[in-house]
Image (cartoon, helix red, strand yellow):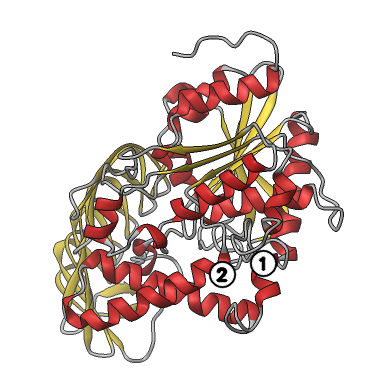
Amino acid sequence: MKPLLLFLLLTIKLSAFSQTGKYVKADHNGCLIWIEEYTLKDSVNWKGGCKNGYAFGNGYVSWFKDNHKASTYSGQMKKGKPDGTGILKWYEDDKIVATYSGQVRNGVPNGIGKLTLINYATYVGNFKNGQLNGNGAAYFVTGGKTIGNFVDGNFLNLDKKYLVLLKKQYVNLKHNSKIYNSEDDKQLFYYALVPSKKITSALVLFPSTGESVENVISCNKVLMQQAYDHNIMTAVVSANYNDPLDSDKATMAFFETVFKDMVTRFNAPKDKFILSGLSLGGENALQYTEMSRNNSYDTFIKPLAVIGVDPPVDMRDLYYGAKKQISVYEKEGDNLSENKKIALKEDHFLVDGFTRLYGGSPDEFPGKYISGSQFSRSEEDGGNAKFLVNVPVRLYCDPDIVWQLKNKGRDYYEMNAANLSAMVNFLMQKGNAKAELIPAIGKGYRVDGTRHPHSWSIVEPLDCVKWILGLVNKNKAVIELK
């Protein structure tokens, strides 16, 4: 599973001067200055002029929370708020954690500017209500970068022709952080790129753990645009933090709501859905497809095919692999690399999550782990994989063992590729001639350009669209893709 995106842990509210505070007299000169979320322990200092009692013109203001510097601004002021051109700085424990230089309106970054989150990234471009919008760039301290279109601070980078056609469809369900871990929306939703001509099939993309839907779109830019050109509707669903579908009724209801909406609103063919996802998203795609063939469940659709992009499929092996790695990593103590520190957090997240969900280890509750797995290597019938015997299945992985050894300290037994190959072998032995393992070694890169085998890029988009067209058109000739 992909670890929770680190930048979610460093949330800087750029609307630090919004409309929920009050005006306070500055120390020394008594000019009125706006303080966000004011408490009796807050204070402000202003070096500059006043107009009608409010701080005005060029100057320097410092905001304090409980006698600790919270933020500063050097530049133009109007009616006690930053307005014009200036420099904002945010502090934690008296250390600068973020800076912004550029245009400000009514206390909020608006216009051309540069935001730097210390030790993470620098964002350059046009800001609207404190967030990057339109053409811009993000330069990360890791060396990666994203250059292109941003929407409300999220990198959403389709070509203009397709971007204007992208629809954000809210469904009649309130936002649920146990389904989608994001503070941006109050309702669950999905993005849809709908062909102008009759829809021949629908490709649904599920995010990995903690991944934004906008990142999924940017990572699959060519795939979605090619799908559009060949009358395939694509949808990206806001689910990145859910439990296994067999026990997560809320997420299952959300998926059913999305599928029904796609069929009724856009006339997507109910019998031509292909589900796909990275990591957790791949688990969702596989598990829903298995449930659709299991008489114990009644699903709205029966997917025509399913794609898993490096998903873990055997929860028993995933649990024990995480337990083993925790022991290995903790022995290294303070010598852990940044990659291994991230992996250690991920392993604790997995073990804690399984314990919460199932009550203990696979030895204690074997049936629960089998039920929650898409494939069980220990079971002669493959566990839930037996329901995919007659379904076209593609499983992608980047089995770069050298990268894993160097960056994660993992061997083949801790890689998803081991169980993915076992799953495909099981399906092939059971007669599934349309089960494929695609080892895209060396093809894994994140959207910022950094190398990582656990990435959407291991799916070659033109080949994938051609595969979908072959399934939908069957014996018809497939148009050559470019």
CA gap, disc 2 and disc 1: 7 Å
Is 146 situated left or right of 375 in this image?
A: left
In the rendered image of this protein, does residue 348 appear above or below residue 158?
Answer: below
Q: Position of residue 306 (x, y in %)?
A: 63, 40
Quarter of the image for residue 94 reads bottom left
Residue drawn at 39 percent across, 64 percent down: 8
Q: Secondary structure at mark 2?
A: helix
Residue bearing mark 2: 316
The amino acid sitting under disc 1 is: Ile
Q: Secondary structure at mark 1?
A: helix
Residue drawn at 39 percent across, 76 percent down: 324
Residue drawn at 37 percent across, 57 percent down: 412
Q: Residues within 10 Å of mark 1 (few under 14, many from 20)?
A: many
For the C terminus, which image quadrant?
A: top left
Q: Position of residue 402 (x, y in %)?
A: 24, 51
Residue drawn at 43 percent across, 46 percent down: 215
Cβ–Cβ below 8 Å for labels 2 and 1? Answer: yes
Is 477 situated left or right of 157 in this image?
A: right
- Name which of mark 2 and mark 1 comes first in the sequence: 2
Q: Position of residue 418 (x, y in %)?
A: 46, 54
Residue bearing mark 1: 370
Residue closest to the eye, 382 or 260? 382
